[in-house]
């Protein structure tokens, strides 16, 4: 029964995105393509210059393409900080389900329409662009699960930051996006960073998000070194998120939208 | 709604008569004083705002710059030429941020949130309300970081800068601003027809333009370059003007940017007025009788 409740919550969130029709998903799909295409041409330009990247062109293209297909899972974005500002976080406490579970179910439900309407067709079309998106190892499955799990934990930590600082939901969101987009390694693989950054970037907490999973996916990193790091950061981040959320939730101040 | 369209002059447009440079400067000074007041009243919040802007801007360009550094350049541009291009884009976005009075460069938000009506009672023409904002203290993070990065890039460029370089830089920044803001107003016209659905259409466009503008088009195939200089003109924000300023393209290439900006401005003006006329007849459905936004 418990699982059914979460499934229904996810279904409700999914329908919330598609009530107006699938046409409303098209602008986001178009933006995803806009984000994808220039970076792929950058990799081709770098490769045509004959530079030694530490990754093959095929790996770089797969890395970028898979990130576009699974971007919402690689870097989890919930509505938590927006809900805090709009007063919706309070509604989470009025329902007979844990706040963590509701948030995860609603977010996962919102992934489904774009996975079906954008990711699936783009995955089927990948051979047309000569891009191989098949994962090099099945270890990518636990790695992806750990990546998503850590993403949710980080979202709750940023919610706690928002609660503590009060009335800075938008700014927290901007800082979070800026920090996570670079330090996760989803756009620029750690392997090609200069100044020796490639040696330690994988070990900071955001490094266990999408960049870690993508590295396993394309075979540029060893799963047996990546997954233990992901497990460590999951344990640490969830411990911080749970404890801090418990200590912070009474301080929540929302004005409503 | 019962509000008559007055050709875009606003309630005060009739009463205030002309709106000249002196009045514009007075309004800008007033905004600057309010901005300083906001900084001093809630310094913690405002410092977080400035830091978040800088983080956002640096993060946006850091990835491309690191690629350029790692490979000694991208597509024929060397490291500091890439940094120059990135800094130029940062300055364009920074100028818009400093002048952005309450989402003035994201008009679909104002329209979609039912806030356009607030302008009806102000003693200034609509265009003046939207154009004349000035927030040099709390919104200058992106401009300052862009200028600092440009100083680093220029100091490392292997070229001597001619006398006309600084005015050309200023002109190109203004053209870049005109392209971005013009496109934002053009797509925001849709918010007059569908306020709820199109509330964030300007931000979607702006953020995707800003992201795509960080990529050097040098080395990209011709069809891709053409698309990014016309249909989705992200290349006009940073790469194309940078090429002229770096001496890679002839100076006359700036005429294309200027013509494009003019065309976008005319289209935006036409469609925005058309949308506004529709809006004053139909009103907005965002608010319930209790005052909450639906």
Image (cartoon, coloured by chain):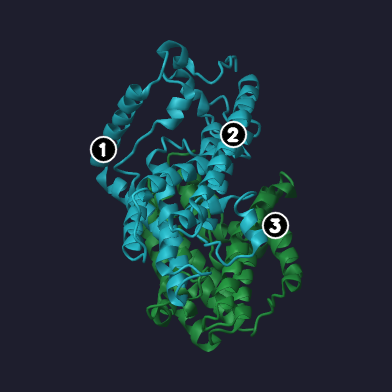
Q: Gap between marks 1 and 3, in whole Å?
A: 45 Å
Quadrant of the image occupied by residue A240: bottom left
**Helix, strand or loop at disc 1?**
helix
Q: Determine the chain carrying the residue at label 2.
A: B
Label 3 crowd (10 A; few <14 / some 14-19 / many >=20):
some
Q: Which one is in front in this view, the residue at disc 3 or the one at disc 2?
A: 2
Judging by the rendered image, the residue that carries numbered circle 1 is: B36
Q: Is residue B244 visible?
A: yes
Quadrant of the image occupied by residue B37: top left
x, y (%) of residue A33?
65, 59
Would residue B259 be found to the left or right of residue A173 on screen?
right
x, y (%) of residue A144?
58, 74
Quick one: B254 or A166, which is closer to the camera? B254
Judging by the rendered image, the residue that carries numbered circle 3 is: A113
**Helix, strand or loop at disc 3?**
helix
Q: Residue at x 59, y 76 (%)?
A: A48
Q: Which mark is residue B268?
A: 2
- The answer to whether dots 2 and 1 both sit on one chain is yes
Quick one: B23 or A97, which is closer to the camera? B23
Say above or below: A209 vs A118: below
């Amino acid at each position: 029964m418990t699982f059914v409740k979460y499934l229904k919550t996810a279904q409700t969130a999914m329908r919330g995105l598609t009530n107006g029709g699938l046409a409303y998903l098209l602008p986001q799909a178009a933006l995803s393509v806009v984000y994808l295409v220039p970076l792929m041409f950058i990799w081709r330009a770098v490769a045509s210059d004959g530079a030694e990247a530490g990754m093959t062109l095929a790996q770089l293209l797969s890395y970028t393409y898979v990130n576009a297909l699974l971007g919402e899972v690689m870097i989890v974005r919930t509505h938590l900080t927006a809900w805090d500002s709009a007063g919706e976080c309070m509604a989470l406490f009025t329902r007979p389900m844990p706040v963590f579970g509701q948030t995860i179910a609603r977010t996962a439900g919102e992934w489904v329409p774009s996975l079906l309407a954008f990711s699936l067709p783009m995955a089927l079309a990948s051979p047309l662009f000569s891009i191989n998106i098949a994962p090099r190892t099945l270890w990518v499955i636990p790695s992806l699960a750990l990546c998503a799990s850590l993403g949710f934990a980080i979202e709750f930590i940023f919610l706690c930051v928002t609660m503590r600082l009060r009335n800075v939901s938008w700014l927290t969101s901007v800082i979070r996006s800026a920090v996570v987009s670079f330090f996760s390694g989803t756009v620029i693989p750690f392997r090609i960073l200069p100044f020796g950054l490639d040696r330690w970037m994988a070990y900071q907490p955001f490094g266990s998000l999408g960049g870690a999973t993508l590295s396993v996916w394309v075979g540029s990193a060893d799963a047996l070194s990546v997954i233990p790091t992901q497990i460590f950061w999951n344990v640490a981040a969830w411990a911080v998120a749970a404890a801090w959320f418990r200590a912070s939730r009474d301080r929540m101040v929302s004005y409503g939208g | 709604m019962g509000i008559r369209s007055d050709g875009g002059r606003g309630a005060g447009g009739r009463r205030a008569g002309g709106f000249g440079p002196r009045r514009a400067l007075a309004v800008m000074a007033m905004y600057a004083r309010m901005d300083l007041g906001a900084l001093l009243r809630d310094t913690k919040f405002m410092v977080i705002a400035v830091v978040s802007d800088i983080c956002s801007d640096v993060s946006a360009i850091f990835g491309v710059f690191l690629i350029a550094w790692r490979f000694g350049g991208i597509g024929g541009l060397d490291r500091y030429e890439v940094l120059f291009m990135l800094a130029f884009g940062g300055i364009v976005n920074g100028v818009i941020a400093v002048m952005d009075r309450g989402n003035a460069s994201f008009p679909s938000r104002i329209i979609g949130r039912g806030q356009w009506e607030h302008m009806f009672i102000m003693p200034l023409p609509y265009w003046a309300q939207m154009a004349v904002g000035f927030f040099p203290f709390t919104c200058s993070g992106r401009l300052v970081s862009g200028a600092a990065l440009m100083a680093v890039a220029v100091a490392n460029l292997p070229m001597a800068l001619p006398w006309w370089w600084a005015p050309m830089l200023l002109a190109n920044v203004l053209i870049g601003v005109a392209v971005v803001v013009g496109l934002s107003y053009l797509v925001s016209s849709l918010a007059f027809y569908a306020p709820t659905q199109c509330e964030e259409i300007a931000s979607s466009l702006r953020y995707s333009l800003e992201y795509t503008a960080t990529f050097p088009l040098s080395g990209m195939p011709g069809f891709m370059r053409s698309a990014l200089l016309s249909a989705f003109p992200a290349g006009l924000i940073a790469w194309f003007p940078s090429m002229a300023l770096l001496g890679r393209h002839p100076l006359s290439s700036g005429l294309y940017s200027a013509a494009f900006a003019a065309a976008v401005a005319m289209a935006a003006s036409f469609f925005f007025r058309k949308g506004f006329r529709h809006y004053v007849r139909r009103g907005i459905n965002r608010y319930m009788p209790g005052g909450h936004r639906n």
